[in-house]
Amino acid sequence: MVKAAVLDRLWTRMSERGDFPMLSQSLRTTMAAMNNDDLDFTGLVQVVLSDFALTQKVLRLANSAMYMAFGGNITTVSRALMVLGMDAVGHLVVGLKIVDHFHHSAPRRIDAKLELNRTLLSGCVARKLTERGDLRAGEEAVVCTLMRQIGKLLVVFYLDAEWDQIRRHIEDGTLEADACVLVLGVTFDEIGAEAAVRWRLPDMIRSGMGEFDPLDVEQPRQVQWLRAITNYSTAVADVLTQQNMPDWEREERIAELAHEYSHALNTDPDVLHQMSVALAREEGGDGVMREIVELRANADAIAREALNPEARIAAGVGDLR
């Protein structure tokens, strides 16, 4: 009963506010790609996968009743783009709101953007781990990794007051999953699973979003592998974006994760560790990690200004303009 009430509230908010916003950089890249006659299909797939809002929207539409004639059960962006066509993707891009002013907005909205970037970083980890294997399996792994965090993103974006309560519990030392149950009565994973059902996502994606259990022998091998990728990638992204953590502790935590998942991912733990650490440095150049650092700096600055009434009034006037 509690779960149904929370989900109904979420879907009401989504209908009022619209779908997940799209990152402004992704908008520019996607539009440029669609206008580039020389861009190959694989390039466009990577552009779509680089933005969470566009990825989930493309998959949802391709698996909707409108496109059931094409067989449904579409688990990759490649297949979805073939079914939808370029024009439909262009309309999706235009229809999604742009997150362009998060840097200069309220701390709550910056917090939402931070969570979105953390999700995108986990997708980068999954893409790095699968780039040399089967392309279809790699795409499914990235999609499952992005969708694994849908429950948390829904709460952050659409249940503002509840997310603030959850965050306060976390700051007081409560585990994130426990804090979610305390405030909402359900877990982020339960919300995400229900969202996947409502959006008609295929069974493989919904299964791949689940919790990885190395002792679970009932799941098919492909599902276990997807869960290992999604869980590892999500955990690494959480460690990489953890605030106020010394570098030595960060590397130590990633090394522990590498040893924990190395067997399931069939990769040497040292190779897995180095790959994950290197990714953070690559992304730090001009990607997700740098934006996370900038967002935190802006959030701190806004928090300091909040103590000054005159600064708050000036910021309000700026927003109105």
Image: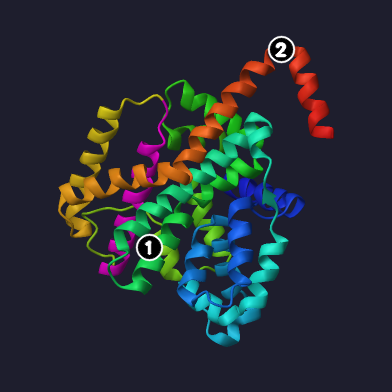
> Is 264 situated above or below 315?
below
Query: Residue 10 in the image: x percent, y percent?
Result: 65, 48
> Is 263 situated above or below 90?
above
Residue wearing tag 1: 141
Q: Residue at x 35, y 72 (%)?
A: 135
Query: Residue 313 in the image: x percent, y percent?
Result: 80, 20
Q: For the residue marked with disc 2, what is the amino acid?
A: Asn
> Is 225 situated above or below 278?
below
- Disc on the earlier residue, 2 or 1: 1
Left or right placement of residue 60 versus residue 289 in this view: right
Left or right placement of residue 144 versus residue 29 in this view: left
State the separation of the CA atoms marked 2 and 1: 46 Å
Range of magenta residues: 220-243
Left or right placement of residue 271 versus residue 50 in this view: left
Q: Residue at x 45, y 53 (%)?
A: 148
- Under tag 2, what secondary structure? loop
Q: Residues within 10 Å of mark 1 (few under 14, many from 20)?
A: many
> Is 294 situated above or below 158?
above
Q: Residue at x 48, y 70 (%)?
A: 43
Disc number at residue 308?
2
Q: How many marks?
A: 2
Which of 293 and 36 lies nearest the eye of the viewer?
36
